[in-house]
Image (spheres, coloured by chain):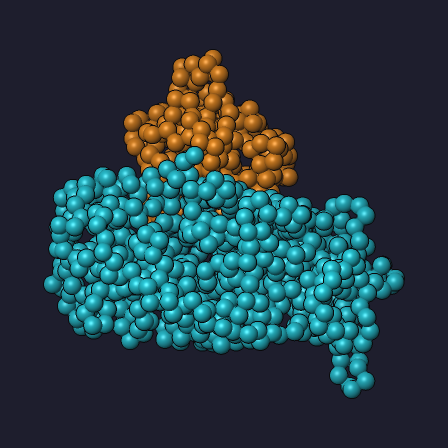
């Protein structure tokens, strides 16, 4: 085949395939014009339409008696009790952050907050799971500092505390870092509002910033395509930089206050945020949900710069904008309230009757006009943009290399280095990151960043009084998921539930951010499909509904996909929160107990495959242990109950709790030693397997009364045994680990900053 | 009942926390929007933390021009108790109601962390019920909290007992570990740490109570 000099057809430049163009022609009964093509280009992008993943996501359980709003809205909402709804949402902002880390991360925070307050919820907390390449690479250090300062700069200023997250370093993210952002908000249940346009004659009002050329094609050019270059850094096309949005937290802060006051004063019929795909997304989704048409005057939209074309105005992803549907009678009150908050409010559209079709049905049309009665520049069925992108059953294929990888188990490697040094090398305190985040605003933070899960009082401006608490954690384990995406994802859910148990909370809702590679690679689609099945299995077994999610595909560079990285955000409730949970500070003389299985099936230690220990040694093969619901469920429930009693004010012999996760059993104990400043003396472990294997749903607990504690464990049918005692100035595990407490604390504290400051 | 005005600028974000702390101590808070020309009938004023006017230009530089600041200045000049917390402290220095200025932290990063404060003077409205040398665990939460002033100002502050609180360990490069200062009269106080975040052991510390209790208590005395 020869190489054509002909310019690329417009639809392909906008990210649409030839067959998608055929579909558009079929919907419209004619060729689309350029503006219409641009609207379909963003709305049918992978990022907006979930066209590759939707057939799989249907398999996730989303029902629960306490679920008020499930997947598909701005955020999931649960009934947390006492008349309070809690909204939760997670999203990715991966590709923008790869190109422009400060603004990419900052606008990720801004976008997720709009999702939450568009439901009527006041945003109360943010979490940020972050994934970078190894810090030996200078570009990674630049990315870390840029992303962290972006979250800090935007989140602190907008006035929402950042209460936790995750920090993962692996070279699969070198050219494609992952920046996920989770937000939680709360609302009086009667303030719940949905993004629906209704009421013929009502007005569509654009609130917030003026519209500029920033972020045009963000969802298609940027989020729904991989990075080309193999070298990552240099090839992160500068040409894509204009597709990154720019954030203004001060604008967003005023927008939050104005929108919540509009809702409190019952001045809006429906409200929706403007995020990916800009105003066309908000207009078409609200119209489609309401089954109505919208007449939009694009010249009414306030602009930041001159000469913008209609397609640019309609698809711009300029930040800090919301769309409200209001009755004409309320316009003056809306305008006055917005003026107080110095928030721009402009009528940009009218709700109109849907068009009648020859077959007797109706269809809501989105008409973009030059003036409300002027020339029509685009005319498309709203639901064809919002709901009718093609669904792809893309081919799936188990990676051909996986059998060999699974066979290469590191569990029985002959190793001659010192276990003590290996342990110290695994410790890393992320305080350098979370010190830059306001984690305390609203006076709710009982347990802040850097612990198993964050724990907040369930309180906030305008909420009914409650003595409950909510707990939030984000978890992921790409190391497990690379070896077995199904079991790895199920175990990730178990890990998240275990983290909540450490602060006394029982899981009530899950949101996911599914970060995967290129969906046209059958191996990637297989990973995604398996991961969804594993998540469904764990959620059913642990009784957790999935209330929302986000799929981020095309995380690849130079043809190399990232390891499958499903991130789980889990929300739990503590029924009575009047005292803090015990945390990691145990006392001299306490017994150190392991709660949960000490050994895997066959009385073997759990496998080292997928552990941080193995990965540090360049050993990336093996197979993870099975997700065993029958063992995990009672153990997690028992710990949650023990800690919840303490939060409720009961006295207890339990003095400390921490779940076994990254770094394994020895890692968990070392972290408790570092934080408490107290040594422990433990009997020998069964080699590296028992020290460093990371099987979740197991807990290290301190108790001042081991007999009573073990009796309660036995009564609950939960395995537990005493490993040793707290005391002295050393961390001692048999003859394998002997190290001064101060050295443990120093190594852990300095690990991150030492790497960031290296040249 | 002591009445406390909590001034709200666009971009303020600690106004609810300040109001909750004041309520917790038995006083009655009222929010006063930045465009107001009066504080209402109140016994004390708090300028809360946050990012007034987005901290654009520099923290406090725009807020000092908000109409409400004339009322705050008038109230302060009559001896009324005025407290600026974090961004409120920055506003008070920009407005010339307190000496000195607040620069970016020494490490050039935002810092949210616990600190230990040492009470340096009890002649201010914020520290009346504390004792000199008392150690208090109160968190900081700022990017621009490094206190600075010229030598002459510093010497007059020492002479007039205007250094109210010091950090036990300096987190941000502040001159002489200064965490909070007052005017000569002791009725206007600013501090970078957040006493309203230290009102309950459930949240880590209740040491802010003695500070805000002093402030609210003195306001009550001023009634009679």
Q: Position of residue A46 (x, y in %)?
A: 61, 65
Q: Nearer the viewer, residue A85 or A539?
A: A539
If the image is split into quadrants, where does the N terminus of chain B sit?
top left
Point 16% across, 42% down: residue: A729
Q: Is residue A613 above or below residue A625?
A: above
Left or right of A89? Residue A719 is left
Q: Position of residue A80 (x, y in %)?
A: 43, 66
Q: Quadrant of residue A487?
A: bottom left
Taking the view exactly as shown, the residue that stands out farthest to the right is A374
Q: Nearer the viewer, residue A197 or A681?
A: A681
Point 29% across, 41% down: residue: A747
Q: Position of residue A736 (x, y in %)?
A: 16, 50
Left or right of A571? Residue A658 is left
If the image is split into quadrants, where does the C terminus of chain B sit?
top left
Left or right of A583? Residue B49 is right
Q: Quadrant of residue B128?
A: top left
Q: Position of residue A287 (x, y in %)?
A: 70, 69
Point 50% across, 27% down: residue: B103
Point 36% across, 72% down: residue: A542
Q: Colour of chain B?
A: orange
Q: Is residue A394 above or below residue B211?
A: below
Q: Quadrant of residue A328?
A: bottom right
Q: Colour of chain A?
A: cyan
Taking the view exactly as shown, the residue that stands out farthest to the front is A1
């Amino acid at each position: 085949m020869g190489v054509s000099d002909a310019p690329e057809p417009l639809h392909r430049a906008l990210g649409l395939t030839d067959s998608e163009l055929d579909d558009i022609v079929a919907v419209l009964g004619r060729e689309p014009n350029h503006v219409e093509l641009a609207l379909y280009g963003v709305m049918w992008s992978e990022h907006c339409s979930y066209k590759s993943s939707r057939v799989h996501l249907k398999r996730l359980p989303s029902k629960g008696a306490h679920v008020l709003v499930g997947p598909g809205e701005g955020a999931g909402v649960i009934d947390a009790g006492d008349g309070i709804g809690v909204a939760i949402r997670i999203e990715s902002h991966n590709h923008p952050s790869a190109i422009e880390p400060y603004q990419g991360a900052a606008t990720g925070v801004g976008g997720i907050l709009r999702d939450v307050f568009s439901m009527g919820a006041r945003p109360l907390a943010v979490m940020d799971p972050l994934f970078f390449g190894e810090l030996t690479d200078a570009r990674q250090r630049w990315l870390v500092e840029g992303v962290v300062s972006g979250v800090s700069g935007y989140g602190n200023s907008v006035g929402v505390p950042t209460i936790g997250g995750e920090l993962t370093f692996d070279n699969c993210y070198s050219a494609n870092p992952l920046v996920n952002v989770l937000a939680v908000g709360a609302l009086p249940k009667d303030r719940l509002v949905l993004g629906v346009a209704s009421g013929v004659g009502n007005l569509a009002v654009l609130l917030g910033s003026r519209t500029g050329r920033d972020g045009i094609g963000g969802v298609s050019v940027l989020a729904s395509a991989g990075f080309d270059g193999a070298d990552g850094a240099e090839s992160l096309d500068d040409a894509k930089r204009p597709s990154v949005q720019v954030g203004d937290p001060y604008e967003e802060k005023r927008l939050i206050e104005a929108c919540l006051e509009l809702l409190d004063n019952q001045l809006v019929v429906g409200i929706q945020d403007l995020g990916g795909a800009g105003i066309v997304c908000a207009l078409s989704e609200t119209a489609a949900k309401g089954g109505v048409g919208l007449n939009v005057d694009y010249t009414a939209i306030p602009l930041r710069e001159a000469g913008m074309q209609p397609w640019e105005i309609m698809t711009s992803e300029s930040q800090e904008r919301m769309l409200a549907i209001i009755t004409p009678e309320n316009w003056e009150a809306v305008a006055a309230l917005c003026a107080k908050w110095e928030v721009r409010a402009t009528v940009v559209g009218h709700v109109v009757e849907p068009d009648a079709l020859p077959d007797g049905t109706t269809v809501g049309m989105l008409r973009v006009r030059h003036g409300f009665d002027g020339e029509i520049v685009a005319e498309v069925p709203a639901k064809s943009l919002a709901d009718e992108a093609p669904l792809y059953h893309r081919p799936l294929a188990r990676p051909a290399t996986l059998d060999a990888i699974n066979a290469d188990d590191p569990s029985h490697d002959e190793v001659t280095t010192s276990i003590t040094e290996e342990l110290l090398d695994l410790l890393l305190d992320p305080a350098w990151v979370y010190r830059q985040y306001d984690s305390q605003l609203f006076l709710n933070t009982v347990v802040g960043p850097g612990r198993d899960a964050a724990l907040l009082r369930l309180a906030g401006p305008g909420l009914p009084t409650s003595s409950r608490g909510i707990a939030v954690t984000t978890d992921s384990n790409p190391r497990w998921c690379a070896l077995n995406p199904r079991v790895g994802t199920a175990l990730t859910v178990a890990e998240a539930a275990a983290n909540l148990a450490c602060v006394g909370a029982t899981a009530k809702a899950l949101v996911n951010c599914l970060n995967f590679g290129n969906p046209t690679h059958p191996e990637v689609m297989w990973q995604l499909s398996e991961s969804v099945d594993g998540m469904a299995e764990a959620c059913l077994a642990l009784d957790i509904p999935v209330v929302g999610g986000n799929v981020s595909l095309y995380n690849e560079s130079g043809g190399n996909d990232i390891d499958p990285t499903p991130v789980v955000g889990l929300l739990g409730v503590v029924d009575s929160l009047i005292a803090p949970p015990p945390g990691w500070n145990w006392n001299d003389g306490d017994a150190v107990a392991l709660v949960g299985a000490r050994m895997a099936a066959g009385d073997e230690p759990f496998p080292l495959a997928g552990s941080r220990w193995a990965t540090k040694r360049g050993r990336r093969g093996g197979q993870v242990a099975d997700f065993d619901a029958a063992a995990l469920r009672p153990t997690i429930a028992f710990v949650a109950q023990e800690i919840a009693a303490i939060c409720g004010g009961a006295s207890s012999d339990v003095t400390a709790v921490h779940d076994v996760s990254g770094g394994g059993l020895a890692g968990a104990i070392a972290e408790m030693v570092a934080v408490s400043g107290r040594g422990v003396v433990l009997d020998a472990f069964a080699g590296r397997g028992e020290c460093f294997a990371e099987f979740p749903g197991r807990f290290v607990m301190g108790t001042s009364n081991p007999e009573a504690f073990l009796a309660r464990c036995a009564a609950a049918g939960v395995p537990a045994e005493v490993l040793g005692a707290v005391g002295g100035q050393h961390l001692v595990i048999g003859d394998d680990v002997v190290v001064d407490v101060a050295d443990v604390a120093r190594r852990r504290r300095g690990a991150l900053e030492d790497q960031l400051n290296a040249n | 009942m002591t009445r406390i005005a909590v001034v709200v600028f666009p971009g303020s974000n600690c106004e609810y926390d300040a109001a909750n702390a004041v309520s917790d101590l038995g006083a009655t808070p009222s929010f006063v929007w930045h465009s107001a020309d009066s504080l209402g009938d109140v016994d004390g004023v708090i300028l809360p933390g946050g990012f007034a006017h987005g901290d654009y230009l520099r923290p406090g530089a725009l807020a000092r021009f908000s109409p409400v600041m004339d009322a705050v200045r008038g109230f302060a000049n009559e001896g009324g108790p005025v407290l600026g917390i974090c961004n409120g402290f920055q506003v008070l220095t920009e407005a010339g109601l307190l000496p000195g200025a607040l620069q970016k932290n020494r490490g050039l990063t935002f810092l949210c962390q616990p600190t230990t404060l040492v009470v340096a003077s009890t002649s201010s409205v914020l520290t009346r019920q504390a004792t000199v040398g008392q150690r208090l665990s109160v968190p900081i939460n700022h990017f621009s909290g490094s206190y600075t002033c010229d030598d002459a100002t510093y010497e007059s502050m020492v002479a007039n007992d205007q250094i109210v609180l010091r950090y036990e360990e300096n987190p941000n490069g502040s001159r002489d570990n200064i965490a909070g200062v007052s005017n000569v009269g002791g009725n206007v106080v600013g501090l970078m740490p957040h006493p309203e975040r230290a009102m309950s052991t459930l949240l880590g510390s209740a040491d802010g109570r003695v500070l805000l209790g002093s402030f609210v208590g003195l306001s009550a005395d001023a009634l009679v």
